[in-house]
Amino acid sequence: MLHFIRERAQGWLAWFIVGLISIPFALWGINSYLGGPPEVAVASINDESISQAEFQQAMQQYREQMRSRMGEDFDPDLFDGIEIKRSVLNGLIEQKLLLSSSFSLGQTISDAALSNVIQSTPAFQKDGRFDSEYYGLVLARVGLSPARYEADLRSDLLTQELISNIRQTSALTTSNLDNVLQLEKQSRDIAYGVIFALEQLGTVDVADENVKEYFEKHQDSYLAPERVVVDYIELSIDQLKSSVDIDEDALKQFYADNEDRLVGPKQRRVSHILIEGEDQAALTTITAAKQRLDAGEDFAGVAEELSQDSGSAQQGGDLEFIQRGQMDSVFEDAAFALQNVGDVTDPVKTEFGYHLIKLTDIQIEEQTFADVREEVESLYRYQQAEDLFYDKAEQLADLSYENPENLDVSAEELDLEIKTTVEFTRDGGADILSNKKVVNVAFSEDVLVNDLNSAVIELSKSHLVVIHKNKHIAATHLPYESVAPAIKESLRFEQASVKAREQGEAIMAQLKSGATAESVFSESNWHTSQTYRRTEEEVSAQVLERAFSMAKPTSESQYSGFTATNGNYIVIKLEGVHAGNPSAVSVEERDGLKTQLARITGESELQAFIDSLRAEASIEVFIQNLN
């Protein structure tokens, strides 16, 4: 729950203003601000209640935060269940408790501090400065008055201050940190053996009646997943390019209008004077050189005298012809910004030092219309198709919304083909079904249940689709015959794993009675003792987790056995434990761990404080009002 408190305490009001400024305030059930029916409570805390409108605002905020984090993987249905609603409501309850506690403790937020927060909020600024009139307009757009917003913001800041103070009460001493490092950097002498489940498969069999019995008890585990088929129309620039009519005169005019793009790369011949270094002395030298040039001295002569580019200085700084992509990008930008032959830049700083750059010639590759006609036509088609795409995209959005019962009108008006997908599950498929947005929309309530057209789905900036349900196939039980072989193999492996465990437990008993590992394990199945730390990668994480949870051996080695997730049985022999050496840890690592531990203990302190507030409060939740 603390993650929810943290997110809201780190400026939820600012998020509300910035993120939702373009959303109509009606979305938020803002009637309570403007007058309306009596508020329905979803919870009461002592003498204070949380309204349904307030809860709905918090739910919408949470969904938008998840949408921002998850991007295309966001599925709104995942964030509408009762557990999510309970979590959000608990966050609101804890926020109310913290705010009440801050009042009881006498905390205050001064008017000056409140004003400073408001004036530094970008959403209330014009041209980087706070504007009081604009501030009022922004709040009005979401149905808030300045007084209401400032009261809520003051409460938010009080909560933040209390949370910060609680976190800071947790202290971590050097001794505490050393103890943690001794554990964190601890190493252990570990040997282990493996009894493989696969080696036991030849000794087990499963009768058909047992397979049938298992199937009948677990039929819900063997379902063909829910599937849908959708009709769709798609609109793309590539699709529209073939429909563009080509007129030779129009192509020639396009060539004339875009000659700079079509005649080939421009090359520029430049000379430069380089003074190496980035210090004030280098800047002073290059500035003095520029002053000499401005006074009329010859560029080549100054370059030969001063330039520290040994490759060009003796040629008067000449670098011959260059084009984009050959030089340092800063150098190129300055060189290609020069308009006329003979122009010289002011000092230009690159990673090599300071330069003065002179433009000495411009050369353009000569290409006639005939030389580049194919490229001209391609660019012309794309530009015309792009213009057509944006016009049709707007029409597609309007037509599919105004005629939601099918795609026929949209397809006919825009001369688009209605296509149909294959059956697909929530895992998607090929072509447009590889796009998670399409799959999520296909299984959304509007499309799947209400039989409506989807909104326009943007597959890319130049590719759009609208979908409509063609067919829905509910999840169905798979026939016994199709799953019986898989069930039989699964049951055989379970029995083989049991056999491996039984054999492993027998070996454990022998080891504890004094037998040597070499006498009960084959050489290939026994891994002799090595010293491992917690983070070793050459040994299974499950082995390390079990080994590091075992008690430290006293006079004799310790043994432990367990069944791994792959069905194998593992026998571990722990021979020794070595504490980590805190003094060998770098200052940077110590500081990083200290910060991490302080954060953890701070969160623990905060959760304990919240738990105490809950225990002392009278809290009632009205679950029926959460919908």
Image (cartoon, rainbow, N blue to C red):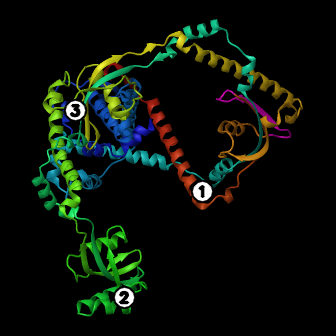
Give the residue drawn at x 41%, y 42%.
6
Crowd around label 3: few <14 · some 14–19 · many ≥20 (10 Å) = few
Viewer can see residue 459: yes
Give the residue drawn at x 47%, y 30%.
615
Cα separation between marks 1 and 3: 49 Å
Q: Mark 3 — residue?
A: 27
Which corner quadrant of the image does residue 244 belong to?
top left
Q: Return the disc, 1 or 3, that comes first in the chain's sequence.
A: 3
Crowd around label 1: few <14 · some 14–19 · many ≥20 (10 Å) = some
Query: In the image, which residues are magenta?
Result: 553-567
Q: Is residue 53 left or right of residue 532?
A: left
Q: Return the disc, 1 or 2, that comes first in the chain's sequence.
A: 2
Q: Nearer the viewer, mark 1 or mark 2?
A: 2
Q: Quadrant of the N terminus?
A: top left
Residue 282 location (% of width, % of height): 39, 84
The amino acid at mark 2 is: Gln
Which disc number belongs to residue 315?
Answer: 2
Front residue (pair 463, 417): 417
Crowd around label 2: few <14 · some 14–19 · many ≥20 (10 Å) = some
Residue, far front: 370
Q: Is residue 166 left or right of residue 473?
A: right
In the figure, 612 relative to 269: above or below?
above
Tag 2, which secondary structure? helix
Viewer can see residue 48: no
Could you tell me how many numbered marks the image carries?
A: 3
Residue 560 location (% of width, % of height): 76, 32
The amino acid at mark 1 is: Arg
In the figure, 468 relative to 171: above or below?
above
In the figure, 267 relative to 343: above or below?
above
Q: Mark 1 — residue?
A: 590
